[in-house]
Image: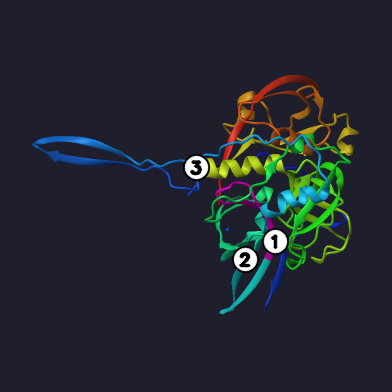
Amino acid sequence: MDTSENQSGLTGIKLIATALVCSLLGGLFGGAIAGKQFLNEAQSGQTGVSLLEGSRQNALIDIERINTDKIMTEAEVYAANVNSTVGITTSITTNYWGFQTTAAAAGSGFVFTRTGYILTNFHVVENSDSITVSLYDGTSYDAELVGYDVSNDVAVLKIEAENLVPVVFGNSDTVNVGDRVIAIGNPLGELTFSLTSGVISAKDREITMASGATMRLMQTDCAINSGNSGGALLNLYGEVVGITNAKYSSDSSREASIDNIGFAIPINKARMIAESIIEKGYVSKPYIGVSVITVSEEMQGYGLPQGASVKDVSEGSPAASAGLQKNDIITHINGEAITTSSEMVGFVHDSAKGDVLKLTVYRQGGTMELTVTVGEQIQSAKE
């Protein structure tokens, strides 16, 4: 991991994933890698060495620009996107002391290419033995799990189909609190292709999942229930701005008992992950090579500034090359004040390979400026 923190986000309330589970009792670069092999030859009395190099066609994603200037009614947004919405069911076989039991899970997803690529949550398809995708017209397909990113709860599926209706991607960075949105999904695994509506309640909310993973999500008051996981959150221009993935629970059970507090993964992040999985066969993430914690109020009482304190610097990382050291406190990035480790994490996550971050660093009573060039961390698409 590039960064870590000691903040637990919003506590006292349990956040749970919203895939529905009904039980009766997941190669570094993902795809094939071109192989190189030397062979000795002895032809016509001539001895030499030939180099054989494998070749394959990479999957490429063509971008089509769609005019979305017109604001629509909720009914129009639903009509334009319901054929892009899918229901997802999986089967999971578990061995308990020599006895096999089978569980079924239900979730949602949406088509994002005409050729059958589908976005959903990782937790919807986690540990599945088989995956079935159902379209609005009742057609069902067996789906392949192309790749996923566990830490961001994103998975890409593929079905063998053509001329599907893909969604239109929006820009989650331009979403405002108060913007109206709708969610389309399959709550309870039975109320298929349901619409719920609401607004964006908050942006960039740092929350902790039941698994302990920390995510930065959009908050919405759309009704999000079991089975909604992986469905599209759309604005009134008909654009997908998020993937619904969680809601709050008031206790330690897995029952999501609090109304009108749901969450969605910003589509910009999910889209970047999906494109990397399809085109490269792996997940690419911005990386500088530090772990940080927030400077506590107690430590500030001893004269230390607010900021993100460096716990560790990875050897050979961009941060190490820039001169960052353990126990440094990062107080500003590109002139913007940093008061918590999560703000530091957010800056790095929102960067791209090659971006330059200008850090203001407190070290042993003095301050200095360091420049870090963001690198790339490569992760298998099936880890």
Rendered residue at 67%/46% (across/down): 167
Rendered residue at 68%/31% (across/down): 351
Decide which of tag 2 and tag 3 comes sooner along the chain: 3
Element on which disc 1 rests: strand
- In this rendered view, identify the residue nearer to me: 255 or 186: 186
- In this rendered view, identify the residue nearer to me: 3 or 71: 71
The span from disc 1 to disc 3 (Cα, nearest Å) is 27 Å
Q: Name the image quarter holding the N terminus.
A: top right
Query: To which residue does mark 3 refer?
Result: 59
Within-10-Å neighbours for mark 3: few <14, some 14–19, many 20+? few
Query: To which residue does mark 2 refer?
Result: 90
Q: Amino acid at mark 2?
A: Thr
Q: Is residue 154 left or right of residue 54?
A: right
- The answer to whether residue 56 is seen in the rendering is yes
For the residues bearing labels 1 and 3, Cβ distance under 8 angstroms: no
Within-10-Å neighbours for mark 1: few <14, some 14–19, many 20+? many
Decide which of tag 1 and tag 2 comes sooner along the chain: 2
The span from disc 2 to disc 3 (Cα, nearest Å) is 26 Å
For the residues bearing labels 1 and 2, Cβ distance under 8 angstroms: yes
Element on which disc 2 rests: strand
The span from disc 1 to disc 2 (Cα, nearest Å) is 9 Å
Q: Position of residue 319 (x, y in %)?
A: 64, 29
Within-10-Å neighbours for mark 2: few <14, some 14–19, many 20+? many
Q: Amino acid at mark 1?
A: Gly
Query: To which residue does mark 1 refer?
Result: 107
Q: Position of residue 185 (x, y in %)?
A: 74, 58
Q: Position of residue 363 (x, y in %)?
A: 76, 25
For the residues bearing labels 2 and 3, Cβ distance under 8 angstroms: no
Q: Residue furthest right?
A: 301
Q: Which residues are magenta?
A: 106-120
Element on which disc 3 rests: loop
